[in-house]
Image (cartoon, rainbow, N blue to C red):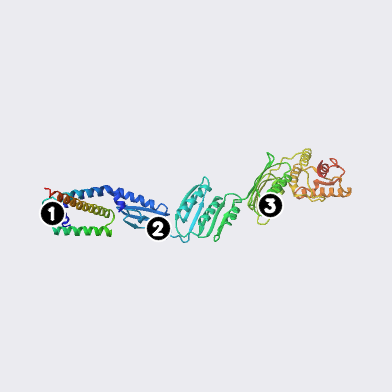
Amino acid sequence: MHGLFRWSSKWWPGVIPLVIFWAIAAWTSTEPLEADLAQRSITALKDTVLDKRRIVVAGRDVTFAAEAFSEDGRQSAVASVEAVPGVRLVNDETRLVPEAKPFVWSAERDVVRVTLGGSSPLPSSKTKLIEAARAGLGGVEVTDRMNLARGAPQRFDNVALLLLDQIAKLKDGKITLTDNKIALSGMARELGGREAISAALKNLPEGYSVAANDIKAPPYILQAYKDPVAVTLTLTGYVPDNNVHAALVAAAGRKFFSEKVVDNLKASIGAPAGFAAAVVPALGALSRLSTGTLVVTDREVKLSGDALYEAAAGQIRAGLGKDFPQNWQFKPEISVKPAAAPVDATVCQQLFADLLGKARIRFESGKADIVADSAGLLDRLIETALRCPNANIEVAGHTDTDGEEAANQALSEKRAQAVTDYLVRAGLPASRFTPIGYGSTQPVAGNDSDEGKAQNRRIDFVVRQ
Amino acid sequence: MAYLTTFYWGWLLASALLGLAMGWISVVQHGEGVSKVTKRWLAALAVVLVAAALSRIVPGRFGYWLDLGLIMFALYLVGCAIGSWLRDWVVSRSSPAA
């Protein structure tokens, strides 16, 4: 031992090459060592959920900065790095993700993109939401402006996914989740979208509620266009259901006696209350125009076109709105068609015959009340009568053979009188018209079939020079 | 430690071999060694450095280099001790015959 102590005084020269070795070792090993430790630290944190992770290694000391989502998670992350073999010190610069109070998450849609904003509780939720948005809104750009924050309400992911489904039903708008209150605004993509969203929101988990639902439905539109050249009535837009659809098409068929009805209507929910009760009389008014367009937008009815004569224009302007259910508005833009050139009495007779050959003036069964469906036909008869102002016209009422002859006679007279009164109310001089009832004495078809009887129940216009 | 030795075992081996060679030579070398006083100062310096390394007060890369230097130096000393002892053993065995 004494020898060892004595010899050690002569060991110093070897320190010189040792220092050289040390310098070379330090020079060559530092960077690979640091890279290796960084890699091992990252591997150790592989299963830990962190945000903004940053690892810097100097020598064997690791500076570890990150935002953790819970205190436990933060401590276990630091411990994992400390446990990496070779790490000497960990400079702990970790902190908790800031807590959002209130916790707000939003999804906003405009024409081309959906922007996800506000806070998301975990990176995995964030990814899930972005992927769900991309999948649910095929072709729409998804912009992520979400940050990460603690303090999300329970079952946040489920609720946010449900709300993303609703964003898909919007044309534009915004859905905001503030803690457990949901606010919606914007315009539904399709008719019925608003109702579908309201229904879906009933499935929200317990504790969540809808604070404001200002989703607007797109306008409920029905259009009817009367084309005098093609002699068609084109119906487009929406009807509430198949029953109303059938009823509207049937009413159009009765009111437009010479036009072919082109039916492009589709059934959809979301119709305003009283839809059929407003559209049927509006179609009646359209049938009185020579050419015209009817546009029903929600509760607003806009009718534009040319009436056949001045009094008809006045009646339509003043009369239609009265037939509407409450809260419906009528916006008439009715002008009057320029009067057609006068014709002589023979031509007039021909025109009357043509019109009455296409359709008959119809009355309530067994009564002398003209039904509203005949207004279009009567307007055309009046327009024709105005073209031959000097002709005197016999308004001839006929019935079929059903019932007592005396009753038929009386009914035919009353009906002829009712038509004459209608013509006089339209502004024609009463002196030009002679109402005559013929009962069932002048049949134009056999009274042995329903079809024949229907043809016999008629009003004829006969021009007397 | 185990991690560090696996990482640069070549340098440690080189230090130990250097020490072995130095120890082998020092037994038969003539001339003055370092004085007792100097040796104490050097020992004190070594203690301070070891204390600094153990207390981890030297940060970052310098701390690593200190650790590295001390480990290499320790192995050098071990090598010197073994080398000197071996040489002494060889010399003492051969001297009666000579």
Compared with residue B71, is residue A455 higher up or lower down, i.e. above or below? above
Of residues A90 and B76, which is closer to you in this image? B76
Where disc 1 sits, the SS reads loop
Query: In this rendering, does residue B44 appear at all?
Result: yes
State the quadrant of the N terminus of chain A: bottom left
For disc 3, the neighbor class at 10 Å (few under 14, some 14 to 19, many from 20) is many
Of residues A360 and A131, which is closer to you in this image? A131
- Residue under circle 3? A278
Where disc 2 sits, the SS reads helix
Query: In this rendering, does residue B57 appear at all?
Result: no
The tag earlier along the polypeptide, 2 or 3, is: 2
Give the Cα separation between the discs numbered 2 and 1. 54 Å
What chain does mark 1 sit on?
A: B
Give the Cα separation between the discs numbered 2 and 3. 70 Å
Q: Indicate the position of residue A315 as horizontal and vertical percent values.
A: 71, 51
- Residue under circle 2? A76
Q: In the visual, does A147 lie left or right of B40? A: right
Q: In the visual, does A343 lie left or right of B31? A: right
- Residue under circle 1? B33
